[in-house]
Amino acid sequence: MKMSEIYALEEANKSSIYLYLEGSFYKAYERSAFRFCKRFRECKVSAVHNLSLACDIVRIGFPKIALDKYMAVAQSFGYSVECQDEKRIAVHGIEPLEGFSSWKNGCVSNAVRAKEQTLPIVNAQESLKLRLYREAYDNAVALTNFTSRLHRNFRFGAGDSLRNESLELAVKLHVAFKRGESLDERQIFYEIEQMRIRTRIMHDVKQFDSGVWKMLNDRFDRMQNLLRSESCCFDVQE
């Protein structure tokens, strides 16, 4: 299955664990990974950023030879096991579990910290500007993708505004990082909030579905949280 298909399935996943055979490992993604860790065993969780979906994806994996052991445990818990095809197995009937979003955010943060430890040391301001730029760039990619699907009554008005605002913010942050220039925190905060409100309007008029709204809103939050970081100094315009 394509990652876009897996992600869509996981967004609607209420009580199952889907396992995908990839090489000699079974892997679970998103909510399936969360449920596996909570009901079977804690696993090392990896996080990757998917550019086409413009979001972070979390996953776990275990060797193929361990499958029978976990399926026996699943049946002992009263869960049903379904072999959907030669490369996908589903475990159904998992009781409701709260806390997926906070668990995922923690996994993503841990992955980012681990990655940053392997990168050349830069000062705190450069590191923050780079992370801000990456978030803004991913936001521009996502909005370009999503606004291209809007109804024609919105595509060239509100859609153009969102695309242009996201591009201008990405360019501004890229230049600040490349040239080592300071940033105007208040102005950037305002620009992010303006995009948030435009995006919420697109959701309220049924142009963005709830999944798209949540994905973009979470990214706006991350950018604003980076702006509030005490590790970086900004220019404050009076």
Image (cartoon, rainbow, N blue to C red):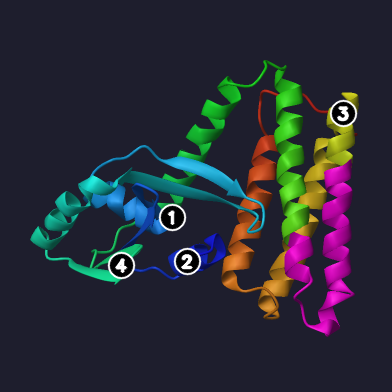
Q: Give how far across and how far down residue 79 sits, in percent.
A: 17, 66
Q: Secondary structure at mark 1?
A: helix
Residue at numbered disc 4: 15
Crowding at dot 3, Cα within 10 Å, few <14 / some 14-19 / many 20+, comes out as few
Verify CB contact (< 8 Å) between mark 3 and mark 2: no
Q: Nearer the viewer, residue 154 or 49?
A: 49
Identified at 53% across, 60% down, the residue is 3
* Comes first in the chain, label 3 or label 1: 1
Q: Amino acid at mark 2?
A: Glu
Residue numbers of the magenta segment? 143-171
Q: Secondary structure at mark 3?
A: helix
Pick whichever of labels 3 and 4 is earlier in the sequence: 4
Is residue 54 placed above or below 4 in the rendered structure?
above
Q: Amino acid at mark 4?
A: Ser
Determine which residue is flagged by label 2. 11
Q: Is residue 55 above or below residue 233?
A: below
**In the image, what residue type sits under mark 1?**
Glu
Q: Which residue is mark 3?
A: 178
Determine whether, in the image, residue 27 is placed left or right of residue 38: right
Of callouts 3 and 2, the N-terminal one: 2
Count neighbours of disc 1 (C-alpha within 10 A) and say few if under 14, some if 14 to 19, many if 20 or more.
many
Q: Is residue 175 above or below residue 205?
A: above
Amino acid type of the residue tagged 3 in the rendering = Lys
How far, Cα to Cα, is label 3 from label 2? 37 Å
Q: Callout 2: few (<14), some (14-19), or many (20+) C-alpha neighbours within 10 Å?
A: few
Q: Which residue is mark 1?
A: 30
Q: Residue at x 53, y 63 (%)?
A: 2
Task: Indicate the position of residue 40 as horizontal and vertical percent values.
Answer: 22, 49
